[in-house]
């Protein structure tokens, strides 16, 4: 980085390359800084419920290491075997269990970061309480490689959960399933995960479901954890609530198998037509049913097969428009449908990205969500930490309004 700074050469940090917003892709000849060889586990400290690992350690490895030491690392983004902890921090990755436990950033105590100048700094550390100075580590969380290069992460962990008990409800309509999610949240039940899968998706992936699945139904997946008696009681209360709310069939499949099946949804849906334009918006949880219904209308208006699932307890939906990847005109139509989905999310008081980030793909959308004052405050931070604009240019924040477009330069 020091050499790039001296020579004025732009760089793109790259972790596992699983990001869905094009953030780790070089667009105009930047140097790629790959973190894949930073694989060292520096410290696992069960007494303090902490570990420090280098940025290239995979998410799956972090979770396994925690479990082997009687601990639990909650974030579970879908590509855990390929994504890196550094990439998870840089995108503030979520996943199903972010409903109860929040995204990756909630678990970061400290970061080792290389600044644009090439200088290495420690931000935060291993203290659970420390209010000396600004919490700069928080700025790096979700910064998508635009503020610094994360080389190591100190994570806060939890003691392992005694039990993790899933339950799945099947509903005759997408709307009934969405209402079940919003009423479960309003009622105050607290599952660790609360997921929605629409009827179209269930028709494709139902055959591989690890249990009994009635035909033509949408699904709600929930997971209750903690001590065994507490998890059993909370799950019973949740199932009573679902049965009261609407006609529902319930199943209690085994946890690990269920979540592996859930992880497989995205790749299975990709194979239907060979490609998809996959989006990631967030809406207030009480607008969920309306959002899913209107996403489906957008799909019909654009004549695109439409599939929706997501981390619905957090209002985070993944609308997917299927395309033939060889038909460029279909991709253009799907991108126009995605733009309508962003407008819908903003109209409902939501966000253009719940967890995947802005990256390169949504750089032109960010102005629609942020006010000019919010944008200027973000750019003030970017300019302070990256005065030459060399860290992942064009990503996350789009172009600096005070500069000529870096693309045109
Ligand atoms: C099948 C599938 C399922 C997924 N499910 C989820 C999900 O449930 N929840 C979710 O949030 N995401 C999900 N994702 C998206 C993706 O896995 C996450 O965004 C993940 O955190 C990216 O990590 P990575 O190491 O692959 O980062 P990359 O793709 O390599 O990079 C992502 C961004 O972070 C930057 N970056 C990477 N490493 C560093 C670093 N060390 N320092 C500074 N910047 C860095 C890059 O420049 C880029 O902007 C899914 C992806 C796939 C393919």
Image (tube, rainbow, N blue to C red):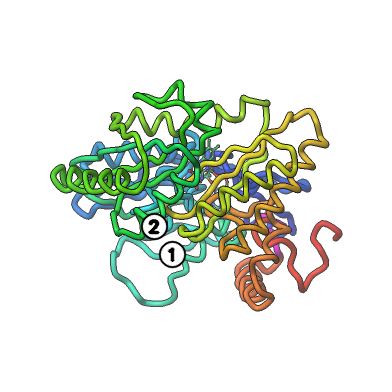
Find residue 187 and report its image quarter: bottom left
Instruction: Tell me where residue 324 appears, x and y as whole percent.
Output: 74, 29
Which of 77/401 is in front? 77
**145 is higher (above) or lower (below) than 232:** below
Where's the N terminus, which quadrant? bottom right
**371 is higher (above) or lower (below) than 26:** below
Disc 2 target residue: 108
Disc 1 target residue: 123
Find residue 19 and report its image quarter: top right
* Residue lying furthest left: 229
* Horizontal side, residue 228 vs residue 20: left or right: left
* Horizontal side, residue 374 vs residue 402: left or right: left
- What secondary structure is marked by label 1? strand
- What secondary structure is marked by label 2? strand
Which of 211/89 is in front? 211
At x 60% / y 68%, what residue is drawn? Answer: 385
């Amino acid at each position: 980085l020091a050499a790039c700074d001296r020579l004025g050469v732009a760089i793109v940090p790259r972790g596992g390359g699983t990001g869905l917003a094009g953030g780790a892709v070089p667009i105009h000849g930047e140097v790629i800084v790959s973190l894949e060889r930073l694989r060292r586990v520096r410290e696992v400290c069960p007494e303090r419920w902490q570990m420090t690992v280098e940025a290239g350690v995979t998410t799956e490895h972090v979770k396994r290491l925690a479990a082997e030491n009687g601990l639990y690392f909650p974030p579970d983004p879908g590509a855990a075997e390929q994504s890196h902890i550094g990439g998870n921090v840089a995108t503030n990755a979520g996943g199903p269990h972010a409903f109860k436990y929040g995204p990756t950033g909630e678990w970061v105590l400290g970061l080792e970061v290389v600044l644009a100048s090439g200088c290495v700094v420690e931000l935060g550390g291993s203290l659970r309480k420390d209010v000396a100075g600004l919490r700069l580590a928080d700025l790096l969380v979700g910064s998508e490689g635009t503020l610094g290069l994360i080389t190591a992460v100190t994570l806060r962990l939890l003691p392992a959960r005694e039990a993790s008990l899933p339950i799945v409800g099947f509903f005759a309509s997408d709307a009934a399933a969405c209402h079940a999610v919003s009423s479960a949240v309003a009622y105050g039940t607290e599952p660790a995960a609360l997921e929605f899968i629409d009827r179209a998706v269930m028709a494709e992936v139902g055959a591989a479901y690890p249990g009994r699945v009635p035909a033509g139904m949408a699904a709600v997946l929930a997971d209750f954890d903690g001590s065994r008696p507490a998890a059993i009681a909370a799950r019973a209360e949740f199932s009573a609530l679902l049965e009261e709310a609407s006609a529902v069939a319930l199943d209690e499949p085994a946890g690990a198998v269920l979540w592996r099946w859930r992880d497989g949804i995205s790749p299975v849906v990709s194979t239907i037509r060979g490609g998809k334009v996959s989006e990631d918006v967030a809406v207030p949880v009480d607008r969920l049913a309306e959002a899913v219904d209107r996403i489906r209308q957008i799909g019909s208006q654009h004549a695109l097969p439409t599939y929706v699932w997501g981390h619905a307890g957090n209002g985070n939906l993944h609308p997917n428009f299927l395309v033939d990847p060889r038909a460029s005109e279909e991709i253009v139509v799907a991108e126009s449908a995605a733009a309508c989905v962003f407008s819908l999310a903003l109209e409902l008081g939501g966000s253009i990205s719940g967890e995947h980030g802005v990256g390169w793909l949504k750089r032109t959308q960010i102005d629609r969500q942020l006010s000019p004052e919010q944008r200027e405050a973000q750019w003030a931070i970017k300019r302070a930490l990256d005065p030459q604009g060399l860290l992942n240019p064009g990503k996350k924040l789009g172009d600096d309004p005070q500069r000529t477009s870096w693309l045109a330069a």
